[in-house]
Amino acid sequence: MTRRGWIRVVAFMTAALAVMTGMAMNSFHDAQEAERRLEYGYQRAFADLVNGVQQIDTALQKGNVATTPAMSAMFGADIARQSAAASAALSALPFESRDLAKTAQFLSQVGDYALTVSRTATAGKPIAQTDREQLTQLSQTAKALAGSLNGVLQTVHTRQVSLAEVMNAAVQEAPSAMGDSIKEMEAAFPEYASLIYDGPFSDHISQRTAKAIENEPEVSADAALKIAEQLVQSTLKPTGEGSNLPIDFYSFSGQSGGDTIDVRVSKKGGRVLSVSTSRYAGEVKLSPEQAIKKARETLDRAGYTDLQHSYYYNEGGELFINFHAVQDGILCYPDLIKITIDLADGAMMQLDATGYLMNHAARALQPPKLTVGAAETRARATVRVQEARRVIIPSNGLNDVACVEVQGKGTDGENYLLYYNEQSGVEERILILLEDENGVLVV
C-alpha cells in the first residue's frame, strides 16, 4: 500500500473512532439524563406521599370536630381524595409491595373508612362517638406516619442515597440507607384498632366465614368423590386438597369426551365449589332459554335448588349465566352461582359457587318501611318505571342490604336499575342495564 493509501486509512479510522466516541458520549449522557428523570419522578412521588399523609391528618382533625352532617361529609370526601392521591404516589415508588404493606393498608383503610362516615353524614345522621374516637386514632397514626416518612427522606438526603438505588443491585455490598429506613418505618408502624365498618377494606372482610357450610360436618374424600362424579357423570380421580380461603376443598380430575374436567368439593358439607373443563364451544344450536333450562338441571344435580337466574350473556357460543338464591320471593344477589353452558348441546363448561357458599343463609328479614309502590313513585321522577321487586344486594363491606330494585328507562333511552334501601329509603346504587342480541349485562 502506498504512503498516501496509509494516510487515507489512518484518517478514516480516526474519523470512525471520533464518531464512535461521540455516539458513546451521547449514549452516556442520554442514560444519565434518563436516570435523572427517573430519580426526579421518584422524589416527586415521595414528596406527594408525604404531603398526602399530612393532608389526611389535617382533614381527620378538622372532620373530627365538625358538628353538622354537611361539614362531616365534606371532610370525609376530602380524606378519601387525599388517601387516593397518597396511594397513587406510593404505587409510583420503586418498592416491592411487601416493603410498605402496612403503609398501603393504612392508606386504603383510612380513605374507605372516611367515605363510609361521609355516607352516614350525607344521610343526615350524626357521627357516632365510636367513629369520632376512631378518627382520633387514625389522625394520630397519620401524624406518626408523616413523621416517619419525613425521617426517611432526611436519611436519604443526609447519606446521599438516591431513591432509585433502593432497587439497584449495585448497592448490595453495603445496606441501602433508604431500604433500612423503610424497613425500620414498617417495623415501627403505629398500631391502631381494627377497623370494622361497611367497606371493602374493613378488617372483617378477612375474617368472614362461608355461611352456607360453616356449621356443616366434614365429609370424607370418598364421599366428596361420589358427589363430584354424580355431577359430571364421569369417572374422576383425587388430585389433592386445597383452600380457597376460608373454604377448604378436595380436588378431582378426569376425562370426558376428550376434555379434561376438574372439580372441587368443599370439605364442610360436601358442596360443589367449582367445575372447570377444557372443552371449546361448538356450533350454536340452543336458544338462551333452552340453555338456561339445561343449566338449572345441572344445578339441581349439584344440589343447588330454588334458584333464579338474573343476567346472562352469549360470547362465542358460551352462555354465561348468573343464578341466585330466593327467600320468600326475594332475590338474594350475594348468593351467586356462575355457570357457563355450551350452546351446542347444553353441556356445562364452567361452574363457580363461591358466592353462594360464602353468603347463603336463612335471613331474618324485617318488614319493609319503604314499599315497592313507594319506591316506584320515587323513581318516576327520573325514569319511566317498567317493573320493581324486592331484592338483597351486597354493600361495599359485603353486608346484606334489603332494597327495592326499580327498573326503568331514562330520558336518554338507557335502561336503569335503581336500588332503594327498604328501611332508610336511601338510594343505595344505580346501575345501567345493557341489552343486545347476545344477552343482558349490568354496569
Image: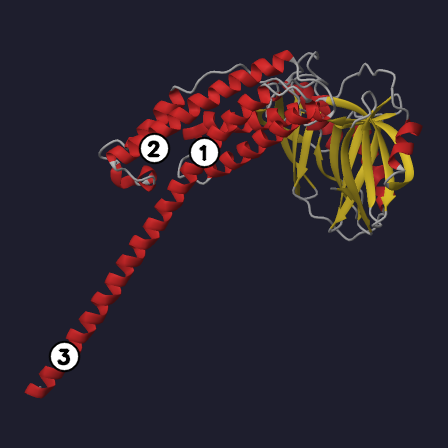
Residue at 93 percent across and 29 percent down: it is: 373
Residue 153's label in the rendered image is 2
Query: Which badge, 2 or 1, is on the more N-terminal residue?
Result: 1
The x, y position of residue 252, in whole percent, is 63, 29
Residue at 86 percent across and 25 percent down: it is: 330
Label 2 is placed on what type of residue? Leu
The x, y position of residue 374, in whole percent, is 91, 28
Query: Which badge, 2 or 3, is on the more N-terminal residue?
Result: 3
Q: Distance between the residues labelled 3 and 1?
A: 59 Å
The mark tally for this picture is 3
- Vertically, is 48 above or below 5? above
The answer to whether residue 348 is left or right of residue 387 is: left
- Name the image quarter holding residue 77: top right
Query: Which badge, 3 or 1, is on the more N-terminal residue?
Result: 3
Label 1 is placed on what type of residue? Asn
Kind of element beneath mark 1: helix
